[in-house]
Image (cartoon, grey):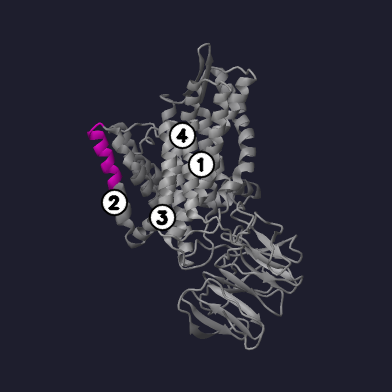
Amino acid sequence: MANLRTPFAPAPPAGPGPSRDRVLDLVRSACLVVVVVLHAMMAGIEVSASGIQITNALENQRWFTPISWIIQVMPLFFVVGGFAGITQWRRMRDAGAAPADFVRTRLTRLARPALVAFAAIAGALALASAAGVSPDLLAQVGFRMGQPMWFIGVYLGTSALVPLMCRLHERAPRATLALLVAFALGVDVLSIATATPAIGFANLAFVWLAIQQIGFWYADGWFRFRSNNLLLGVALGAFALLLTGTTTAPYPADMLANLNPPTINLVLLGVVQVCLLSLITARLAVLMGRPGLRAAVDVIGKHSLTIYLWHMPAVVLLAAVLLVLGFPWPEPLGAAWWLTRGPWLAGIALVLIPLAGRLGRFERGTTGPPRRTPGLAAAGVVIAIAAIVTVLVAGFTTVSATIAAILLLVALRLQHSSKRSPVARNTHDRIQTDATDTSIVDSHSTFRQPEDTSAPNDRGLIGSTDGGVTWHPLPLHGEIDFHSLEAKHGQVYGYSSTTGEIMVSRDHTSWDRRGKIALADFAVSPTNPDELVATTEQGPARSTDGGRTFAAIPGAPALALADWPTPEQAYGIDARGRVHVSTDGGTSRTPRGQLSSAPQATGGCTSRPSPIW
């Protein structure tokens, strides 16, 4: 019998299992670090008798052009965003969510931390102005801080279109990608032919949506199932086109210059990057097996938006402190300037890390029960993008930041009612009551307590000892996302979708990490604490050592959900909603009824005959 110890590839859309790619988690974190370092290195601060001037120290430097081909990571950002968007939308769609629910989720995720950042920037600029800081200096600072905000607006817009773009992708993937590339190229041609660069800003949609589609293809496994030779050939072909376009056509050779406005070169660069990434995915997966690196990636991932929003304010804050303390400022790109870049980057990290740790909670959680009024999600996106455009056009000023914060607040208020619900039930995870009469449940996704609107995505366990009237965090709260839970034999069994492990605890405090397996659901024998049955992509599997190893059950049909309420009866439901019943612990099965739709959870009770719901 085959031993199932290695997680399988991302589940198909119909499956209820978790879909995440740890290598892409690493890529996203690495890209974010590159962006922070790049913007910190660009900060050229000159202090003279005439005042303080802030410039882009790397602008128009010929030696920087080839480096820009390596550090231009925005295409990878949007590839990862496309993967994350389509996998999340497919899970939500399979659970019965509407496109507006997905849009509302993405809007809340982006707008909450942006609102906090913009409001804080407005207050800081007002204080600086009242303290007598030069208006010209504040204008320079506001302009530099506002420039990176384009990403928030474009990412929100492309994320809001994921349900539509997913539908087009699933109907005609090649035609959808080809059409977006053709539009992007057409915008470039028109912009260059008419010498009107402003036309190129239409590619804020076409270029980034095309790259998002590449992320869709990555999620579908297209790159995973291509040979190394083909991937290398595609990468070299795209690189050749990129080289031709920047040497013989009127495209800038600097890849950062191709960002404003976006050009077709970014799509080509994205193809090169994703092909090269696919070639080294196996090596990166080995790296992600290191606990230290995995923990660092998880921390960065949970604070990614906060880091992005606050890295420029961190640069400004550090510079302000150094100016007040009278530190000397070497001439940008001079020998002394290069020698001080290490301490400069370290100082920014010392400012940014506690900021992200303190403020990261605002990018997680919700602001209350969602409003279901049609059109409010789309209206919220438009208003939030208008907020971003405000600071892009005017830079950060006290007025523009205040207006943008108000617009973001309006966008959020449109999505959520001020009336709080006690607890909103998730569509899959189940409440379990153990031998101590403690009700426990994984609080991931939509599980919310009235007073807690800032819990992390991987929220872990919450418990109740009064029948569910009040809830309190249990150990691993905010660290582990338990996809399934079961309480039997005086202990709690859980499956961590964060690590892919079976975990068992007797006291809710210490957890024994058992074997790794990619599963959709599991059930524990009512008579044997060491016997578990799991539903996997390859079919049901059985463990007889408490979840440390699993072996396939021969001839069993592929199941999505499982429950084992009594020794005499175990239930399984496949992805089509067909119910299977076993009277010998899953060794043999008898098909029973057919559900009208795919289920999200199942449960039985210990009475005989055992009902199922």
Q: Residue 400 carries which label?
A: 4
Secondary structure of residue under mark 4: helix
Q: How far apart are marks 3 and 2 (CA)?
A: 16 Å
Which one is in front in this view, the residue at disc 4 or the one at disc 3? Answer: 4
Secondary structure of residue under mark 2: helix
Say if mark 4 contacts mark 3, CB within 8 Å.
no
**View extreme (top): residue:** 49
Residue type at mark 3: give it. Val
Left or right: residue 177 versus residue 559 is left
Left or right: residue 296 versus residue 187 is right
Residue type at mark 4: give it. Ser
Left or right: residue 470 versus residue 33 is right
Mark 3 or mark 1: which comes first in sequence? 1
**View extreme (bottom): residue:** 609
Residue matched to label 2: 179
Mark 2 or mark 4: which comes first in sequence? 2
Residue matched to label 1: 31
Which one is in front in this view, the residue at disc 3 or the one at disc 2? Answer: 3
Q: What span is in magenta?
A: 182-195
Is 189 covered by the magenta stretch?
A: yes
